[in-house]
Image: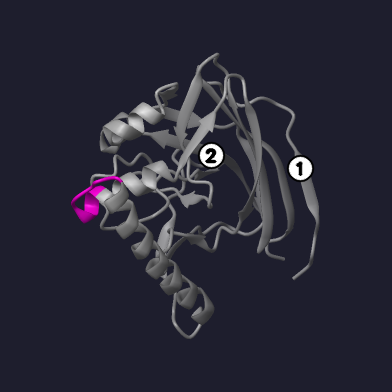
Amino acid sequence: MRNLFITLTFFFYATVFGQIELKIVELKKDSLKNEKLVIEIRNLTNNYLAVPFDQKGFKGYNSEELCSDLKILDYPHRFFGLALIFKDKNESKEPIQSLVRSYHVNDKDVVIDKVGLEESKTKDNLTNWGKNNKLKSQTEIERNFYIMHNLLLLEPKEKIRMNFDLDIFDIKRGETSFYNYYILNNNEEYSLSLKLCADKFIYNYLTVKQKQELKKYKFFSGMIESNTVPYLFSYE
């Protein structure tokens, strides 16, 4: 594989949706397995905002998983993650759907071992979380735990810059043995953007005490979409 190092800096602005601006600032590529996206998220208001945002990684695009209300937890993924939106520039306006696979033990021993450790650690954390917050059912605990650990708290006019690793062949679905991936055509240019969605009903899963602790924040709900940037897929 020919190693190329490409850094693309994007100076045009993201689409602004009233309260929050999400922008792809930079795309760094030196191989398909070593790509990075630099993004900015900015609070455009004079209010304190709480935004559901899983910062551990991206999620693959699936129309049914784009905006989760956390009612169904049977197929876990990064519910509040930034969805990668790839579009064919010449053929379709619809986003390309990501596909799902599971890791094979022979291929991904280390990954599966790590997932097992993370799941064990999470179970212990969930048990303590349920007791400390007086939550009863396991589903209630899992929802509450995920929301409270994935809220981005923004001060008025605050701007945050973040770096994310990007591997379109291995987009982990949280602490599970499954991952998403994309099939793209070699040497073809696509458009890439990001979407972040927050369902207003998720805040019903917070306790009265938690809402009181976050009372100075407005809970964000709705869809945020970033600017669109060119993405050249090439494995030569």
The secondary element bearing badge 1 is classed as: strand
Q: Residue 24 in the image: state x and y as whole percent.
A: 64, 37
Q: Residue 222 in the image: state x and y as whole percent.
A: 39, 27
- Seen from the viewer's position, the closer of residues 83 and 3 is 83
Residue 139 covered by magenta stretch: yes
Residue range highlighted in magenta: 133-140
Q: Which mark is residue 113?
A: none
- Seen from the viewer's position, the closer of residues 184 and 182 is 182
Give the residue at mark 1. Answer: 8
Q: Which mark is residue 194?
A: 2
Rendered position, 11 above or below 2: above
Q: Residue at x 31, y 33 (%)?
A: 209
**Badge 1: few (under 14), some or many (20 or more) residues near its Cα, within 10 Å?**
some
**Badge 2: few (under 14), some or many (20 or more) residues near its Cα, within 10 Å?**
many
Q: Residue at x 60, y 34 (%)?
A: 228
Q: Residue at x 53, y 47 (%)?
A: 55
Q: Amino acid at mark 1?
A: Leu
Location of residue 217 (image quadrant): top left
Rendered position, 167 above or below 105: above
Rendered position, 229 above or below 56: above
Side of 223 relative to 161 (left or right): left
Side of 97 relative to 26 (left or right): left
What distance separates the C-alpha of mark 2 from that of mark 1?
16 Å
Q: Main secondary structure of the magenta part?
A: loop
Mark closer to the chain start, 2 or 1: 1
